[in-house]
Image (tube, rainbow, N blue to C red):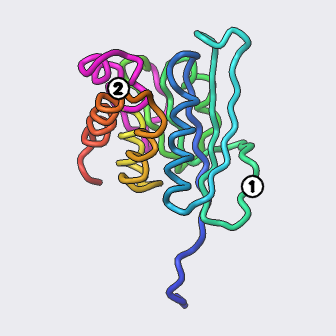
Amino acid sequence: MNSGKKEKTQTSIRFSGVGGMGVILSSIILGKAAIYDNKNAVQTQSYGAEQRGSKVKSDILISDLDDPSYPVFDKVDILVAFSQEAYDYYVTSTKKKSLLLINSDLIEKTSIKRNRFNISATSIAEELLSKKITNVVMLGALIKLSKIVSRESILKAIVESVPKSYVDVNVKAFERGYDFFQDN
C-alpha cells in the first residue's frame, strides 16, 4: 500500500580519473549541490602521492536519510570515469544496474555495455576553453542522466566553487554536458 510518502534513498557515486582532471572538485561541487537541495552528502577522496598524473577517485554518498553511512563502497550506483586507467581500475566496483558515464575521448576500451553513456567531454571542453573544464562537462551530463540534484543547485555550486574569472565558461561547460544527451 502506498502511503504517499516518498521512499528515502542513498546513491553512491564514484568519480575517477588521474590527478589534474578535476575529479575531486567534481565531487565537492556535487556535494554542495546536494546540500542546497536539502539532502545529505558525505565525500571522501584518494589520490597518489605525486597527485598530477596518478590515479584519483572521489566517492560521494548523496542521501535523504537523516544519518547517511560513511562513503566506503564495494559497489557504486554511478561510476563517472574520466580516463582509461580509471575506468579499467574502477569498473569492477559497479553493480549490474549502475549508471556508467564515460569520457569517450580518453576511454576507448570498455567491457560493459549496459547503462553506459559516452560523452566526448574533453573535446567539448577544448572547444570552450581547455581540457581543464572537462570535469564540469561531465557534471552536466551526470546531472542530466541521474537527476541526483537539481539543475539550479548544481549551477549555484559551480558558481561558488570556481574562480570568478572562470564562472561563465564553467557554466557553459555544464550546459554543454547537460544538453549532450536527449531527455531520457
Task: Tell me the crowding category of disc 2: few under 14, some 14 to 19, or many 20 or more residues within 10 angstroms, Cα based.
Answer: many
CA distance for labels 2 and 1: 31 Å
Query: Which stretch appears magenta?
Result: 109-136
Q: Is residue 72 left or right of residue 171?
A: right
Label 2 vs 1, first from the N-terminus = 1
Q: Dot 1 corresponds to which residue? A: 69
Residue 117 appears at what percent x and percent y? 38, 38
Q: Is residue 24 above or below residue 66?
A: above
Q: Residue at x 28, y 39 (%)?
A: 175
Kind of element beneath mark 2: helix
In this view of the protein, which residue sits in the foreground, 147 or 81? 147
* Quadrant of the image occupied by residue 149: bottom left
What is the number of callouts on the image?
A: 2
Q: Which mark is residue 77?
A: none
Whether the magenta-drawn stretch holds residue 70 is answered as no
Task: Tell me the crowding category of disc 1: few under 14, some 14 to 19, or many 20 or more residues within 10 angstroms, Cα based.
Answer: few
Identify which amino acid the numbered label 1 is placed on. Answer: Ser
Q: Is residue 167 above or below residue 132?
A: below
Q: Is residue 6 above or below residue 164?
A: below
Give the quarter of the figure containing the N terminus. bottom right
Kind of element beneath mark 1: loop
Residue 22 appears at what percent x and percent y? 51, 24
* Quadrant of the image occupied by residue 141: top left
Q: Residue at x 41, y 18 (%)?
A: 132
Identify which amino acid the numbered label 2 is placed on. Answer: Ala
Q: Residue at x 74, y 43 (%)?
A: 72
Q: Residue at x 71, y 46 (%)?
A: 71
Q: Is residue 96 left or right of residue 69?
A: left
Residue 92 appears at what percent x and percent y? 63, 33
* Quadrant of the image occupied by residue 136: top left
Q: Which mark is residue 121?
A: 2
Residue positioned most to the front: 164
